[in-house]
Amino acid sequence: MRSGQAGPEWTGMRESEQVTRKKNSGSRDKKLVRQRAAVESRRQAQEYAGVPADIVKLLESPNILPEWAKFYRAYPTVTAAVEAAHRGETAEVFSSEHEHFLLRVITLDGDPVVEVLLYVPHGTRDALWSGLLHSADRQDTLKRLPVVLPQLLPEDVRFEEVDSVVEAPGPGAQLPRFAYRYRVPAAGLDTWKALWDATRQYMPLQEAVGWYDTRAAENEEAVEILRRHGIPAVSCGACGHAVTNRHPAWPGTWVDFDPDEYGPRCPAWDDSALTAEDDLDNLAIGGPHQVDEAVLSASLTMASNE
């Protein structure tokens, strides 16, 4: 055996020591994990005393929206929200993650009720605003709109227990908001999971007014439905957006209500005739919405005669 070269027995001893060290290291790591889990469990037990496990998980998630975190911390159970409502507090949360969604716990005739409002999508709202602005008698139209609102939903999501709501304009606003509302008795409901389980039947309605895959009638389609019910809404013949020339800020000019990058102009307006070779001259300058005045006049006349 050469000098410095370990024999079989010595090599076996070194390998055994390495295995032992690895086992000891693994045991220490597992022990640390258990200790940290125990500390975390004690922290959660102290911080979330009486809070259901599913709500704790949500509050600990980095992905929870601020409005829901605030709401669940204040009212971790339906019972807590009911108690707050009885004290005269406003127990509510508004979110626009997937749709305009308002949940609140109120008392009606002394009984606690969970109320949910699902506001119509922007394109549906725009058609309703257009019809309202072009109505000869706006007060009469406002009375008729709750009857027409269900017609803007697919047939398979129309429920008898869902109400159509027309809210008065808020501070600084000039036009109302529109929503579909359902109410659930809070008696017997303790956790929010129990509420969600009790309201699964309304999920198709929530999906129908969602941002990503709306099935509620919007813009041109909604305008056609409203006209069939005698409400003179107007849409652009080029882009299909609901429009008006009675906008408080743009009287006499056909504009839509969408506050996107196009502003009040028609995004489908063709300005190709103005195209030049220079890149700066190729920038679209936009143009007006296209409205068939004859069709509009006939629609307004028909609506005024009803």
Image: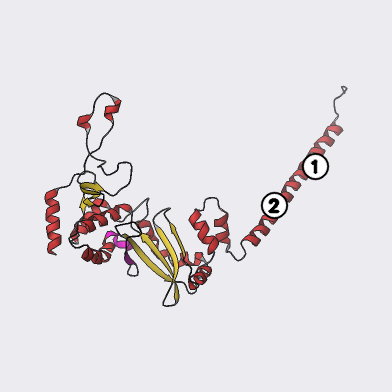
Q: What percent of the width, then of the height, locates residue 266?
A: 24, 42
Q: Of 249 and 119, which appears nearest the observer?
A: 249
Per the rendered image, the range of residues in magenta is 152-166
Which residue is outermost to the top?
Answer: 2
Task: Count up the numbered dots.
Answer: 2
Labels 2 and 1 touching (C-beta < 8 A): no
Q: Is residue 67 visible?
A: yes
Which of disc 1 and disc 2 is earlier in sequence? 1
Identify the residue shown where x is 27% and y is 29%: 282
Q: Indicate the secondary structure of the residue bearing disc 2.
A: helix
Mark 2 — residue? 36
Q: What percent of the width, then of the height, locates residue 279?
A: 30, 26
Mark 1 — residue? 20
In the image: residue 107, left or right of residue 227: right
In the rendered structure, which amino acid carries the disc numbered 1? Thr
Q: How is the image coloured?
A: secondary structure
Question: Disc 2 to disc 1, how far (Cα)?
Answer: 24 Å
